[in-house]
Image (spheres, rainbow, N blue to C red):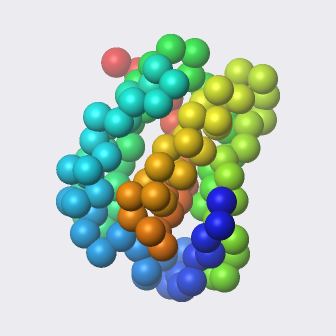
């Protein structure tokens, strides 16, 4: 990934995020990659992303940086079970960066949703 987080406030939230989360949600909602489907929903200034598919794992490390001017890193996996999920999320991040140049999805929290 070739991007840098430019500015963060004291709570760790980026100030230079997507200028229009609704546009991102409308453009990316329903995206399918490697058999996984992504649902995007605006949540204030944030975007909630639900990843649906088989063999997904929450055993990954998010790419949200701890300090400003940090490079945007890839999602990494903590176990073999998390490898597919990490790889698919990294593809989603790259696709979003192509569609919205100069912007990157920063994944902060990952959790399993029980239906």
Is 87 left, or right, of 44 in this rendering?
Answer: right
Judged from this view, the residue extending furthest toward the top is 54
42 and 32: which is toward the camera: 32
* Residue at x 41%, y 73% (from the top left corner): 17
**Residue 106 percent across, percent down from the top left:** 52, 59
Is 71 left, or right, of 64 in this rendering?
Answer: right
44 and 71: which is toward the camera: 71
Is 50 left, or right, of 64 in this rendering?
Answer: left
91 and 74: which is toward the camera: 91
Instruction: Note whether 33 is above or below 91 in the view shown.
Output: above
Quadrant of the snapshot with the C terminus: top left
**Residue 19 percent across, percent down from the top left:** 30, 75
Instruction: Note whether 98 is above or below 102 in the view shown.
Output: above
* Residue at x 68%, y 52% (from the top left corner): 74
* Residue at x 46%, y 20% (from the top left corner): 35
Instruction: Note whether 47 is above or below 86 in the view shown.
Output: below
């Amino acid at each position: 990934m070739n991007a840098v987080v430019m500015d963060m406030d004291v709570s760790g939230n980026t100030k230079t995020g997507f200028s229009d989360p609704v546009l991102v949600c409308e453009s990316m909602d329903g995206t399918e990659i490697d058999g996984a489907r992504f649902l995007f929903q605006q949540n204030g200034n944030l975007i909630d992303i639900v990843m649906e598919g088989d063999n997904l794992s929450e055993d990954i490390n998010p790419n949200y940086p701890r300090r400003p001017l940090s490079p945007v890193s890839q999602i990494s996996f903590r176990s073999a079970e998390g490898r597919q999920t990490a790889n698919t999320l990294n593809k989603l991040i790259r696709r979003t960066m192509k569609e919205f140049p100069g912007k990157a999805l920063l994944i902060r929290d990952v959790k399993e949703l029980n239906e």
